[in-house]
Structures are given as C-alpha cells and as structure tokens.
C-alpha cells in the first residue's frame, strides 16, 4: 500500500503520481491522506487502481475516471465523478450537487444524500444513491441508470432522453417529458444488479421506474409551429 | 465568484478562539474573492440603553475623538469611541436615529456600516489576509462571526461595495451571486425612503431586507419574500444577534455547504474553508437545499 499526503505533496503531487502509473502497474493500492476539501483529487486516472481517500474532498473528485476504484471516506463536493468513463467512485458520506454529471460509464455510489442535479446529462454512467437526490436530477439524461433509495426532488428527469430512473421513495415532481413507466423483468434484473453492486439491501420490487415519454426530443409534425 | 463563510460556536469554551478559528476559513476563500473582504463579529454586548455603531472613514488617521466630543455635546449623551483600522466602534446612549442624522449633517464623510447591541462590521478592499490583520481580528472573541471575500462583478471594488451589508439592528448580510433586478428594485426602495451608498446589487438585497423588517416582517418572513422578489443567483448568509441564517435561490446556482459538530456550526461556499476547523474531519456535512431557510442559535 502506498500513501500520498495532500498536506505535503498537494493535489498536483497526488494526480501526477496516480495519472502516470501504467495499466499493468503492481502499485495498485493507494491511500490519500488529509484531502482537506481540496478540488480535483484523483482526476483523470486511467490505470486499474484502488484509491482510498480518507476525509472530505472538494469539487470534481474522481472526474474522468477510467478503470480505477476510488473510495471517498467522507463528504464529496460538487461534480464528483463528473464525466467518468469506467471504474467505480464510492462516496461514503453525502455529496454536493451535480454528482456524476455527464458520466459516460462506470458506477458511482453515494451512501448518503446527493444534492441537486445528480446525474445531469448522464450518458451511460450508473449511479446508486442510498439517500435522496435534489431537484433537477438526471436533467437531460441520455443513457445509464440512476437509482435513488430515498426521495427525489422537483423536476426529476426534466427533458430526459433514454436514461432510466428508479426511485424507491417519493418524487416531488417529474420534469418535462418524464413519466412513470412499467417495471418489466429486464428492469428488475438491472436494478437487482445495481443494488447488489452498491451493497444495498433494498428490494427491486419496492422501486418505481421513470423515463422519457419521448414526446419532447422526437420531431412531431403536430408541434411544427413550436420549432 | 465570491466566498462566504460563517462560524457559530455552540461550545462557550471556544469563544476566546473565535478570531483564530475563523481566520483560515476566510483566507481559504481568497481565490474566490481577492478584491476585498469583510466580517461581522458579534461580541461585547452593550447595555440596553446603549447603541453600538460600526463607522468607517477612508482615512485611517481620521480623528474619531471629534465625533465623540461632537455627539456628546449635540445630543447630550455619553459616547465612547475605539478606533480599529480605518473603522471605529462607537458606543453611545444617544438615540440611533438622532446619531445617524447628526453624522450625516456634520460628518457626511463618515459611513455607518452597522449598528445594534453586539454587531461589529469591518470591511475593506484588499486581500482577505491583509484585511483580517488590519482589524486585529486574530484576537477577536465572541459567539459567532460571518465573513465575505469579494470578486466584484456587479459594481466597483470599493470599501462601501464590500460585504457585509447591515440590514438593521444587529443584522447583516453577505452574498455570493448576482442579482439581475437590483436596478429596478433600488428605485422602488428609494421611493419607500431607503437610501443607498453604492450601485451594488447586494446593498439592494440588504435594503430590501431592512425595509421588510422595519415594516413588521420577521427575519424568516423577510427571507421568504426575498425568495419571490429577488431575481438572480444568490446564497445569502444573514448574521443576527443570536446566530445566523442561510438561504439559497430556488435553483441553487451558487455553492454552499454546511457542517456541524458538538462544538460548532459552520457554513461556507466550499468545504475547504471548513476543513481548517478542529473536528471537521468528523463533522456532519451536507448541502443546504434550495429555497429553504436554515437558522442557528434562534436566528
């Protein structure tokens, strides 16, 4: 196990070390100490590492991640795992707004609550939130799954494309063109896989599924005047 | 940009360290606001019969004694003055309105930046670290303090345009964001008799709150109507005699994070400001919800 202390090497010291490790490195397990809420910790990683961050982080932690498994033992700031490509980012505390924004792939797990705009413009990432999400979550979500074990705030899935949303608790309101949809066997299987991966005990059958009514993003001749 | 920070001490044993605990919080927000900085600190409550004013003058060598002597003579009241940087803390038995009127008529170059029984406001252009030193805030003791680091967007970099802005007795406001309807609202408030020192958007929000409070609203009601009437981006931190309140615009455009331990409650634009506090690693941390009013210490 290797250790990086943010208070001595700084964010650049952490990132330049982790970003330059080759894919076949033997130094796979890293611990980051004293993150002190600094931004951009462990961004742009591309080797299959296990990175443990002991403390609260600032903005964009784990952004653009590929292949790494990053665990944040604390609170995560704005834009955690934004634009993640693959791998895993696991937040043991709560998360601020825009978690998993524009993510292309991989799994983001937030044990606590995520704030507003969770999964905004998601493009294939899977997000599992143990608590609740704030308003405008999955706004313009294109692909991937957002699983919320608590409640969802206002305008869930506003202007959504093909992302799939699963919520166990209450939804304050649905956004434009977002509707409740039938939960079929394939969805239950998907949900079971995601809940398991996130270490959750919830039952898939307790969730409701939401997604696009596909009226907003398809050209409709009846709406020609509106274009 | 701009950074806002607030610290409320639940554990009275920490009161003597307030200034030292708060300093790294404010300084951490320097790169969000290097233009100017300000704080409102709640300490040394006066007697009920007295009012405490925070006064400012552009010249740090200004002779505050003449305010002391002049006021005592004109209003037949007791006064004490204490110069701190280019500010002065005036404690007087004179009636608040009469003091303000006398200052305006006789010393228009002196700005009233705050008033009440416990509040003291200090603000100045320059780096937060320099501002902090200028007002000897390192040694400040008290129950709570709020601060602001400013990156000016809506109006000029001046001391008068720095935050906090007073909104009434022992009340003040710091703001991260920008308001889009402040020009029209300023005109409306002028017609209601409110006066303005700057072209600053936050001063309009402060005057709006002051006007609401003067016309009978509670702080909570004033903030609730502010959510309807103020258009733009904002996270407000409102300091009161008892504590502070936090409110964000309904879209929650501007960052905000809160943290709480058994010893303190802290609010900041970014968590890294809070990271300096003892016990922050173990604190409960969360993001305040939009359009919801949070208060601490009976704010």
Image: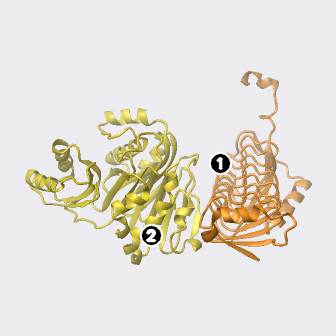
Residue placed farthest to the top in the image? A225
Q: Is residue B121 above or below residue A177?
A: below
**Chain letter for the part of the structure drawn in yellow:** B
Give the letter of the chain under mark 1. Answer: A
Crowdedness near tag 2: few (<14), some (14–19) or many (≥20) residues, C-alpha within 10 Å: some
Q: Is residue B11 above or below residue A133?
A: below
Where residue B187 appears, as percent x and y from the top left, is: 37, 32
Q: Secondary structure at mark 2?
A: helix
Q: Secondary structure at mark 1?
A: loop
Residue placed at 52% from the left, 52% from the top?
Answer: B32
Q: Is residue A207 left or right of residue B45?
A: right
**Chain letter for the part of the structure drawn in orange:** A
Where residue A128 appears, as percent x and y from the top left, is: 76, 60
Residue B185 or residue A185, whichever sits in front: B185
Tally of marks: 2
Q: Is residue A47 left or right of residue A227?
A: right
- Residue A202 figure quarter: bottom right
Judging by the rendered image, the residue that carries numbered circle 2 is: B21
Q: Which mark is residue A154?
A: 1
């Amino acid at each position: 196990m290797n250790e990086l202390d943010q208070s001595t090497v700084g964010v650049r010291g952490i990132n330049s070390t982790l970003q330059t490790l080759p894919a076949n490195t033997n130094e796979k397990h890293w611990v980051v100490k004293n993150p002190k809420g600094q931004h951009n910790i462990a961004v742009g990683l591309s080797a299959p590492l296990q990175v443990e961050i002991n403390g609260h982080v600032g903005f964009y932690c784990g952004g653009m991640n590929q292949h790494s498994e990053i665990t944040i033992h604390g609170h995560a700031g704005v834009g955690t795992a934004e634009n993640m490509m693959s791998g895993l980012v696991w937040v043991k505390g709560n998360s601020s707004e825009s978690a998993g924004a524009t993510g292309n792939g991989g799994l983001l797990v937030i044990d606590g609550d995520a704030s507003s705009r969770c999964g905004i413009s998601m493009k294939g990432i899977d997000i599992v939130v143990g608590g609740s999400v704030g308003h405008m979550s999955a706004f313009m979500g294109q692909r991937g799954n957002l699983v919320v074990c608590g409640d969802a705030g206002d305008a869930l899935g506003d202007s959504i494309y093909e992302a799939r949303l699963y919520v166990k608790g209450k939804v304050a309101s649905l956004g434009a063109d977002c509707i409740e949809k039938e939960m079929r066997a394939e969805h239950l299987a998907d949900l079971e896989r995601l809940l398991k991966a996130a270490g959750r005990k919830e039952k898939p059958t307790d969730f409701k599924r939401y997604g696009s009514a596909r009226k907003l993003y398809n050209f409709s001749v009846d709406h020609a005047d509106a274009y | 940009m701009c950074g806002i920070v607030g610290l409320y001490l639940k554990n009275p044993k920490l009161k003597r360290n307030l200034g030292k605990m708060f300093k790294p919080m404010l300084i951490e927000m320097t790169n969000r606001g290097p233009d100017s900085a300000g704080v409102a600190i709640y300490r040394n409550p006066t007697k009920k019969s007295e009012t405490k004013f925070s006064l400012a003058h552009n010249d740090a060598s200004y002779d505050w004694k003449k305010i002391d002597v002049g006021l005592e003579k004109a209003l037949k009241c007791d006064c004490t003055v204490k110069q701190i940087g280019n500010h002065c803390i005036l404690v007087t038995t004179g009636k608040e309105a009469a003091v303000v009127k006398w200052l305006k008529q006789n010393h228009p170059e002196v700005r009233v930046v705050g008033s009440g029984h416990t509040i003291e406001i200090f603000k100045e252009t320059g780096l937060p670290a320099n501002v902090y030193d200028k007002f000897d805030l390192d040694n400040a003791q008290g129950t709570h303090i709020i601060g602001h680091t400013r990156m000016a967007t809506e109006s000029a970099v001046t001391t008068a345009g720095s935050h906090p802005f007073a909104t009434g007795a022992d009340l003040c406001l710091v703001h991260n964001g920008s308001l889009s309807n402040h020009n029209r609202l300023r005109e409306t408030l002028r017609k209601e008799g409110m006066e303005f020192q700057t072209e600053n958007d936050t001063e309009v929000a402060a005057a709006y709150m002051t006007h609401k409070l003067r016309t009978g609203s509670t702080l909570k009601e004033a903030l609730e109507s502010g959510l309807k009437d103020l258009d733009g981006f904002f996270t407000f931190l409102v300091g009161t005699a008892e504590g502070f309140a936090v409110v964000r615009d309904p879209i929650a455009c501007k960052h905000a994070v809160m943290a709480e331990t058994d010893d303190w409650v802290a609010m900041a634009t970014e968590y890294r400001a809070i990271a300096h506090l003892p016990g922050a690693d173990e604190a409960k941390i969360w993001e305040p919800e939009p359009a919801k009013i949070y208060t601490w210490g009976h704010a």
